[in-house]
Amino acid sequence: MPISESTPLFSNKNLKYPSPLSLYWRIFHWSNYILGGVSFAVGSYQYFPAVSNYDLGAFLYTLGSVGFALADGTEWWTNNRVGCFYYSDFEDSFERDACTNYASSDTLFGKYQRAENGLNFFFSLLGSTLYLIGSVLYIPQLNSIIAGTQIFIIGSAIIFFSQAWKLWRVVSVKEGSAVHIKWKMLLHDLPGSFVDTFAGLGGFFYFIGSVLFLPQYDTSDDATFIAAVWFQMGGLFFFFSGLALAVRYFFTENYPH
């Protein structure tokens, strides 16, 4: 599809829901996402005791956090805020195509059903934003590394929660009044499932690593090494998530088009 026929990056004027993701949009989104994955993977290496290049580590984390925040913000604003925030231009198409099995929009439950996806993706954006704040505080000259670590803990927990929520929404199928877990639903968009799984694992490993980097636990080079291993694994999982996203965007049609 030509770029001119698709949705611009930050436009809410297209009445069709979901908006098609143009090649330009996918390249922009993926480039920022993989920038985050690469920067976090390389940045984590700087925290091993034998390297201890904290200036470079903080710079790479900040660069990567900017990439993640841009990617998550773009993804939330395009399609995923619909039902949750500022979506009147999409409302008719959204109600017709996505809300046929929802409760009335006049009810609290119906409002939640429409907003759930937007809230889920907003948590991803919130986690990336906290990473950005924490990364800046990691800059040694600011003397705020402990505060940065504490914010990383919160951001990592939010990212893990957000990705787990996405996967839960995929596998939980409501049949009548009962909810059944159907793992085979993950196969409908396998690259997308890997994107969310790897990102969730990245958040989990950074959560543990950040806790271990707190001064009450980081008391020796051996302890630092263990914490850095958790960081390194988290960075690698974020990178793997970016690779899975490339497969989804450029080798499948598992996205709005």
Image: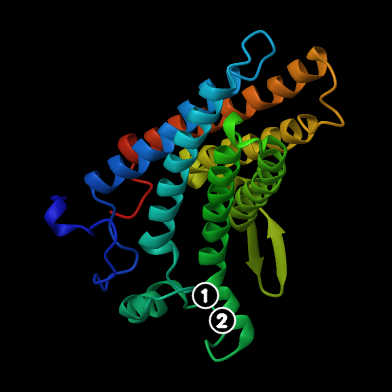
Q: Position of residue 48 (x, y in %)?
A: 66, 15
Which residue is denoted by mark 2 in the rendering?
111
- Which of the two residues, 67 or 187, is positioned nearer the viewer here? 67
- Which of the two residues, 109 or 214, is positioned nearer the viewer here? 214
- Which of the two residues, 228 or 10, is positioned nearer the viewer here? 228
Amino acid identity at mark 2: Lys
Amino acid identity at mark 1: Arg
Residue, far bottom: 106
Q: Quadrant of the C terminus?
A: bottom left
Q: Position of residue 35 (x, y in %)?
A: 41, 32
Q: Would you place residue 83 above or below residue 22 in this image?
A: below
Q: Position of residue 156 (x, y in %)?
A: 66, 43
Specify the color scheme.
rainbow
Q: Name the secondary structure under disc 2.
A: helix
Q: Would you place residue 158 above or below residue 135 in this image?
A: below
The residue under the point 81% across, 19% down is 223
Whether residue 219 sits left or right of residue 83 in the image: it is: right
Which residue is denoted by mark 1 in the rendering?
114
The reply to whether discs 1 and 2 touch (Cβ–Cβ < 8 Å) is yes
